Amino acid sequence: MSSMRLSAFVRAWLRAPIPSAAVGGAILAIAFAAPATAQSADAHGWFSPEQVVRGADLYERRCAECHGEEKAENFETWPYSAQDLIGMIISFDMPANRPGGLPAQEYVDLVAYFMNRGGLPEGEEVLAGSPALSEIKIPQ
Ligand code: HEC
């Protein structure tokens, strides 16, 4: 992976005018009215194997045609929360050929895939809305 490229998009993200929680939160609030139960970073994992498979498939179909493997590799070291990553992706109007157009759960499945690539384990929980999305981070 290219760390220069990673820091370039992180810098760009930090300069972005809309806070990630506002962007990602608005979308997720619509889709997930039910409160998520609190989870801890133990052996349960944060997302299911099925979500990771769906996320990988989504990446192939919705992102890889323009980005190849590069973005998925970059996100393996994403230093902020999964919620922030969704906010960043949405704030950059991705996927570019369908800005903001994926169902909320698909953005969540995508970040489950990225977080898993970054080293967070699969488990039995199904990752959905807050607070879990704001709590999980790839260990740096
Ligand atoms: C139709 C082509 C296209 C598709 C599909 C697409 N992107 Fe992009 N994306 C671009 C272009 C062009 C840019 C701006 C130039 C760049 O940074 O590569 C960009 C930029 C980005 C950026 C911010 C800038 C950076 O350097 O990181 C992120 C994050 C991103 N894309 C993620 C995604 C994700 C995740 C998906 C799938 C959900 C996706 N993109 C799908 C074309 C696309």
Image (cartoon, helix red, strand yellow):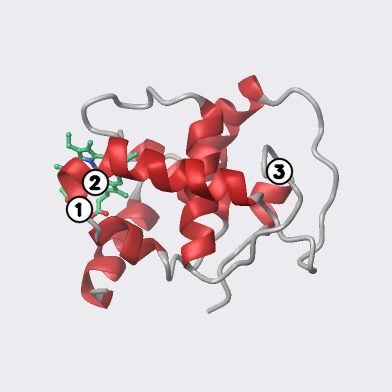
**Element type at marker 2?**
helix
**Element type at marker 1?**
loop
Q: Which residue is mark 2?
A: 64
133 vs 7, nearest the viewer: 133
Considering only vertical position in the picture, is 39 above or below 127? below
- Judge: label 1 CB < 8 Å from ligand 1: no
Is the residue under label 2 in contact with that under label 1 (CB below 8 Å)? yes
Considering only vertical position in the picture, is 18 above or below 135? above
**Looking at the picture, how far across and down is residue 103, in whole percent?**
49, 24
Instruction: Indicate the quadrant containing the N terminus: top left, top right, bottom left or bottom right.
Output: bottom left
Q: Which residue is mark 3?
A: 126
**Looking at the picture, how far across and down is residue 105, in whole percent?**
56, 31
**Element type at marker 3?**
loop
Query: What residue is drawn where x is 56% and y is 53%?
Result: 82
What is the CA distance from the residue labelled 1 to the residue labelled 2? Answer: 4 Å
Q: Would residue 123 appear left or right of 96 to someone viewing this image?
A: right
Q: Would residue 91 appear left or right of 125 to someone viewing this image?
A: left
Q: Which residue is mark 1?
A: 68
- Residue 5: quadrant of the picture: bottom left
What is the CA distance from the residue labelled 3 to the residue labelled 2? Answer: 24 Å
- Judge: label 2 CB < 8 Å from ligand 1: no
**Looking at the picture, how far across and down is residue 123, in whole percent?**
72, 57
